[in-house]
Amino acid sequence: MALTVPCMKPVVAVKRQLQGFLAKSYVSISFVDSAKVKPPKKIRRKKQNMKAFEESMSWEDRLADAVTPLWRLSYDEQLHIKQQNQENILSQFSSKLSHLIAAHQSPVVNDTLGFSVLPIMPSPVRDCYRNKSTFSVNKGVDGNPKTVGFYVGTGRDRNIICVNGDHLLNMPEKHKQVARFYQEFIRLSPLDSCLLFHKGGHWREVTVRTNAKGHTMVIVYFHPQTLVPEEIAIHKEALVDYFTKGPGAICELYSLFFQESSMTRCGHEESPYQLLYGQPHIHEELLGFKFRVSPDAFFQVNMAAAEVLFTVARDLCFPEGVADRVSGTLLDVCCGTGAIGITLSPAVERVIGVELVQQAVEDARHNAALNGVLNCRFLAGKAEVILPGIVPQLSSSEEGGGGVAAMVNPARAGLHYRVVRALRNQPAVRRLVYVSCKPDGEAMRNFIELCCPPDPQKKLMGEAFSLRVAVPLDMFPHTQHCELVLLFER
């Protein structure tokens, strides 16, 4: 599995590489052998040596090591490390599945454990690629509790220091600029910052979203504590004045939102995002389609790499030259704002998307209409509640017939076991593409449950899937994180 790095026209390179793989017979596919690929040994340092090492570093370098731990390496070296990490993860999957099959004494055909790991797809953009950044507020190096940046240290160890992120390679200048001016604003404010909810304070973190056109959306999070609405209104007005008429006007905000919340994280339903200034949405464009993005909607943080990701997903779902090509239904689980389903809609008769966040579903419906896409239907709710009811109907005559392909792109926690069960037990689903940003976490359990022998205790009675190909993709240069796109078939 030699490392190759296409440096031009990445979308074209993706298509050619996948076509070359899919043209081969599955019998000849290489597989990850857990006996050959061993996880790297963990580097252990004595605590006193680690402490001495950290104390000799600048705060900027400590933060860079925490947020972008691969920043000191060349990009080729970064890709090599990520390739090895993904191969090790897939080796663990192969080993666990082998032991499970042996324990069930199940007959296994030669290619059940055979799959190919393609060379990692590089990000077309290496620096300043993030279109969304969230900056925290806490005590800085100088002790000022109104410092905006990123954490070094942990709450458990009670050694958190908030460090300015102006030097981070993955952050665009516009995000850093907004963070600097937000810090200036809260330092001018008579209200304290909210470091711990039970100790009072109001000003919290700030999120910055930007798009290719340079539009900037800012969301300020605020703890109301005991303030009445009339008091909060005064500070909202000061915030608007600062960013539209005061020093912060240089940021040229397209949108300014404000969310009052006494919880660490909450969506629009629990505490509505209040538009204080500008437009309610920004828009992105992917593979010729336009998408509306709301304040809390999920969208890929690296747009150039997202185009590569969606191309990989499309070509795995609908590979040219495969005799049983899906032409019926695409089931898009965890569909977000509908980006994957809409970009794949020309290759399928219909798309059914399922998403938990109601605002994201509204965005998805709007995006389908915006692009003139008529074959998409988006449903709001928990996938584990919705799927068991709709999956059995997908291949019925009254639903239009045809085969079913599934696309799943869950959060780091992976899919709920009932979602896996619904997909596994529906014989119409012959091809499944799984996009994972943390394949060594709970997603590993999903992979095993999709491919394991039938298990009556877990109600996994359908025919097992087989992993055919894994495609690592670097969505987050300078970090250790990587997207892994997996094609399962049966």
Image: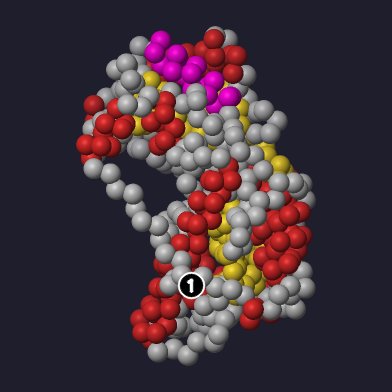
Nearest the eye: 202 or 195: 195
> Which residue lies at the image location 57% right of the left edge and 57% below the top edge?
472
The answer to whether residue 12 is magenta is: no
Q: What is the span of residues highlighted in magenta in the rendered image? A: 173-188
Judging from the image, the colouring scheme is: secondary structure
What's the residue at 35%, 11% (across, down)? 190
Q: Main secondary structure of the magenta part?
A: helix
- Amino acid type of the residue tagged 1 in the rendering: Asp
Residue 229, picture quadrant: top left
Viewer-closest of 107 and 189:
107
| Residue 111 drawn at (x, y percent) | 57, 81
- Establish if 328 lies above or below 378: below
Residue that badge 1 annotates: 33
**Residue 321 appears in the figure:** yes
Please determine whether, in this image, residue 84 is positioned above or below residue 194. below
x then y, percent, for residue 195: 30, 27
